[in-house]
Amino acid sequence: MEFAALLSVGVSTGCLYGLVGLGLVLVYNAQGIPNFAHGEFFMAGAFAVYVANVLLGIPFAWSLLIAVAFGGLLGAAVEVLAIRPIAMNRSLGKASTEVAIVLATVGLMIVLKGLARIPWGDSMRNLPPVFATETISVGGLELSTQRLLIVIVAVALTAALSVFFASTALGKEMRATSQNTVGAKLIGINTSSIYSATWGLAAICGAVAGILAAPLIFLHPDMGTRMLLKGFAAACLGGFGSVSGVLAGGVLMGVVEIFFGRYFATSMMDIFAPIIIIVVLLFRPQGLFGSRRAVRV
């Protein structure tokens, strides 16, 4: 029973890592840069659902929708106000532009943390349990309803994104823009709108992870920092070119972490993320589920 209980916790935690990693992958594939402010989308989603549900008394289902919408708007606003002006600066070369955007995301990370501290300070807050029944029994095993919800939503969102990119016009335009921005412009795709939509969608992935995690953890302005590192590791392990691979990478990370912490040393659990990033980049840069791409130069 202990094995099954640990496995359920590891899978649900890994799904959160995978959701954060999905947002990182979307921005990276669109503009070729890591978004170091992505952890703050996780934090924003958690605080948005806290404000709506606890402070305003809105039912959780509606609070969730409000928080998701807030996350999407925040991501799009960040792209329009902070990223796009740098990307459109013709005085910078391509390499300089990418470095400038990366530094901008680091600055955004600091700014968003600072803004969150204005109303919340450094005190810890928590969201009450969402479900009246906190556990359900499956084959004699008691499972957390919140953790079960995390797994269901993560799998559903990953599947929805896969279908979205494969079957919808906007998804295909996003793929075309990420593969060849100049070519996308030549066939009439509004790449500026695509970038905004991509950042909004990436922020939604991060916000959903924060919303789902909120009833299980304490809320504070720095909560996104640790999750950012976990999301990067999940994306590296699964592969930046595979949507489903990122979720699988996150689940694998979560399971390994929980079993290592239980049977070896809890204090060492957080070393897995940086180790995974280094090892994967050294021996399999495309990740476990990614594929090598030939680039013509």
Image: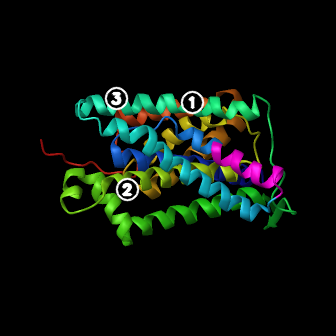
Report the residue marked by disc 1. 111
Q: Nearer the viewer, residue 192 or 144?
A: 192
User: What percent of the width, then of the height, locates residue 33?
Assistant: 37, 38
The three-letter code of the residue at mark 1 reads: Val
Residue 59 included in the magenta stretch of the image: no
Instruction: Locate residue 129: give its quadrant.
Output: bottom right
* Side of 85 relative to 270 (left or right): left
Mark 3 surroundings: few (<14), some (14-19) or many (≥20) residues within 10 A: few
Marking on residue 193: 2
Q: Tell me which secondary structure the magenta stretch mostly adopts.
A: helix
Element at badge 3? Answer: helix
Q: In this view of the protein, can residue 287 be seen by the observer? A: no
Q: Quadrant of the N terminus?
A: bottom right
The three-letter code of the residue at mark 2 reads: Ser
- In this rendering, the label closer to the viewer, 3 or 2: 2
Label 1, label 2: how many angstroms apart (C-alpha)? Answer: 24 Å
Question: Tag 2 or tag 1, which sits nearer the N-term?
Answer: 1
Instruction: Locate residue 86: give its quadrant.
Output: top left
Report the residue marked by disc 3. 99
Write the start and end of the magenta stretch as one range. 44-57
Label 3, label 2: how many angstroms apart (C-alpha)? Answer: 22 Å
Write the residue at 50% across / 44% down.
234
Write the residue at 57% across / 48% down.
206
Mark 1 surroundings: few (<14), some (14-19) or many (≥20) residues within 10 A: some
The three-letter code of the residue at mark 3 reads: Val
**What is the residue that sits farthest to the right in this orientation?**
132
Q: In this view of the protein, can residue 145 be seen by the observer? A: yes
Write the residue at 62% across / 39% down.
257
